[in-house]
């Protein structure tokens, strides 16, 4: 009887114990859900309202790119490294900030249309390489919707420029160590039958260093000449200009020489006038005369191309670029009317003959214009050119501004655009995250500058955007 009574008590209390456990579990789950939403809301609020993370990633990008050797694994034929994780993180944060504000509605819509064209091209012709290129493109271009307000204010722009100069000094210094033999070269080349090491600043190729310097050179010239900059800042910038110029010479990058020289001439013309341009041109001519024999051998492929010694489809034209251009243009033309308009999704030719050993690289057309045309068609290519043209027109308009910083921003952006456009003929700057990050981040500032007397026209707390839809 006692056992029966105990069993009855147990069975009567068991449901109540179970219900209490279920209630506790429900309470715990509810609290965890509320906590998760609270944390998520806090993170989203921080991403939207804080610009510190934008500055952090833009400034540390040159250091992040130095980790290119460390690959964790391969996913869908693509190597995954720290750069990959950072790009995905940046893409997510830019996306959250972009969707949580109305800036994407205010800033020029053609940038968003270009992203839409690229995404549509990849969706209709998907491949692992196409998605990889699209993710890199989105990670860089979406800075257009987050970095503008940060870089459109003079003091914060100066902090960004100084910090980037210090960080960019690291690969410049490493290039000197490579030249001195204290650090191994990462890139080798053949010039006149002799194998030489080309300084890359410990990046995979010298091109990565060139893509960084085409942005940092105008920033350094701005810091070296601004009336409001301290003597320490000016001295630091001038030392960097000298060291970076020597580092550029060590890269032996033919188009890089021309692009950075063009930047200097262009900036001096906008800032100082024709007299300063003539002085720099004289210095460049003197340097060229002193090193004429070396430059003649270095630019021999260009000389042969200009004199018609090699057909454009020859594997010798511009060191194989002619054949690469032919392959990709032939792939584009033979793809059919639909792909003429919307492209082939990516810039990798899947059925390229693996036995062709004189092509520079099977997955690069070695021209950004041809690459974008092949990947995103005439629709994406046309919008892309209009974006660059819009940036250029906005920079030219800023030159007429009475505000010194607004003029300075235009004076920096125009040389950057000129170098970017020139390098796009024989290289692929938009394919490299660093090059696209800075192009769209600094370009965004052109459209986020405050109008004159904005505080008198607009209520407190609201910023006026100048000519954002023009």
Image (cartoon, rainbow, N blue to C red):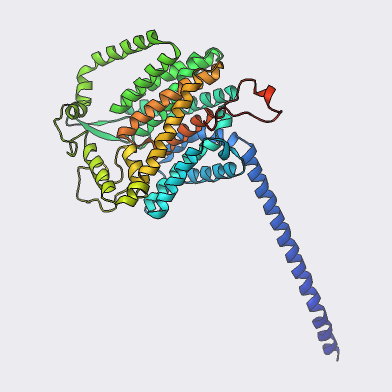
| Place of residue 427 in the rendered image (x, y in percent of width and height, measured from the top left) | 32, 35
Residue drawn at x 47%, y 32% as measured from the top left: 438
Q: Quadrant of residue 428?
A: top left
Residue drawn at x 40%, y 42% as measured from the top left: 380
As drawn, 392 above or below 430: above
Residue drawn at x 62%, y 43% as measured from the top left: 100
* Left or right of 298, for residue 101: right
* Left or right of 105, for residue 174: left
Residue lying at the far top in this picture: please name it. 275
Q: Is residue 292 visible?
A: yes
| Place of residue 241 in the rendered image (x, y in percent of width and height, measured from the top left) | 42, 19
| Place of residue 300 in the rendered image (x, y in percent of width and height, measured from the top left) | 19, 26
As drawn, 5 above or below 69: below
For the image, the number of numbered tags is 0
Between 369 and 81, the one nearer to me in the picture: 369
| Place of residue 393 in the rendered image (x, y in percent of width and height, measured from the top left) | 45, 26
Residue drawn at x 69%, y 30% as measured from the top left: 461
Between 409 and 248, the one nearer to me in the picture: 409
Q: Quadrant of residue 103?
A: top right
As drawn, 380 above or below 25: above
Q: Is residue 251 visible?
A: no
Q: Quadrant of the N terminus?
A: bottom right
């Amino acid at each position: 009887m006692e056992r029966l009574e105990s069993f009855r008590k147990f069975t009567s209390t068991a449901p109540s114990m179970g219900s209490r456990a279920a209630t506790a579990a429900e309470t715990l789950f509810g609290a965890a859900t509320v906590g998760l939403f609270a944390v998520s809301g806090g993170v989203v609020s921080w991403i939207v309202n804080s610009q510190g993370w934008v500055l952090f990633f833009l400034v540390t990008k040159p250091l992040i790119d130095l980790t290119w050797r460390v690959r964790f694994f391969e996913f869908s034929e693509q190597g995954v490294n720290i750069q990959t994780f950072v790009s995905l993180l940046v893409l997510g944060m830019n996306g959250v900030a972009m969707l949580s504000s109305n800036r994407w509605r205010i800033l020029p819509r053609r940038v968003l249309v270009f992203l839409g064209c690229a995404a549509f091209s990849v969706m209709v012709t998907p491949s692992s390489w196409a998605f990889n290129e699209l993710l890199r493109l989105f990670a860089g271009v979406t800075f257009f919707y987050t970095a503008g307000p940060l870089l459109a204010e003079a003091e914060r722009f100066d902090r960004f420029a100084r910090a980037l100069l210090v960080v960019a000094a690291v690969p410049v210094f490493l290039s000197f160590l490579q030249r001195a033999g204290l650090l191994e070269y990462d890139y080798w080349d053949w010039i006149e039958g002799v194998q030489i090491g080309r300084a890359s600043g410990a990046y995979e190729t010298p091109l990565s260093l060139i893509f960084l310097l085409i942005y940092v050179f105008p920033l350094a010239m701005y810091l070296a000449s601004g009336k409001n900059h301290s003597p320490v800042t000016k001295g630091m910038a001038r030392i960097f200009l000298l060291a970076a110029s020597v580092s550029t010479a060590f890269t032996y990058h033919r188009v890089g020489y021309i692009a950075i020289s063009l930047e200097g001439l262009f900036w001096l013309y906008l800032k100082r006038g024709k007299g300063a341009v003539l002085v720099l041109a004289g210095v460049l001519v003197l340097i060229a005369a002193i090193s004429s024999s070396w430059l003649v051998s270095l630019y021999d492929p260009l000389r042969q191309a200009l004199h018609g010694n090699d057909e454009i489809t020859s594997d010798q034209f511009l060191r194989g670029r002619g054949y690469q251009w032919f392959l990709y243009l032939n792939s584009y033309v033979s793809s059919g009317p639909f792909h003429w308009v919307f492209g082939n999704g990516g810039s990798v030719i899947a059925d390229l003959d693996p036995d062709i050993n004189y092509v520079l690289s099977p997955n690069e057309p070695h021209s950004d214009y041809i690459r974008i045309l092949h990947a995103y068609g005439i629709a994406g290519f046309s919008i892309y050119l209009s974006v660059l043209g819009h940036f250029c027109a906005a920079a030219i308009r800023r030159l007429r501004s009475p505000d010194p910083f607004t003029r300075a921003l235009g004076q920096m952006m125009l040389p950057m655009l000129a170098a970017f456009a020139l390098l796009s003929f024989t290289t692929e700057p938009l394919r490299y995250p660093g090059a696209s990050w800075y192009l769209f981040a600094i370009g965004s500032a052109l459209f986020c500058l405050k109008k004159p007397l904005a505080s008198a026209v607009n209520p407190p707390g609201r910023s006026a955007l100048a000519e954002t839809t023009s």
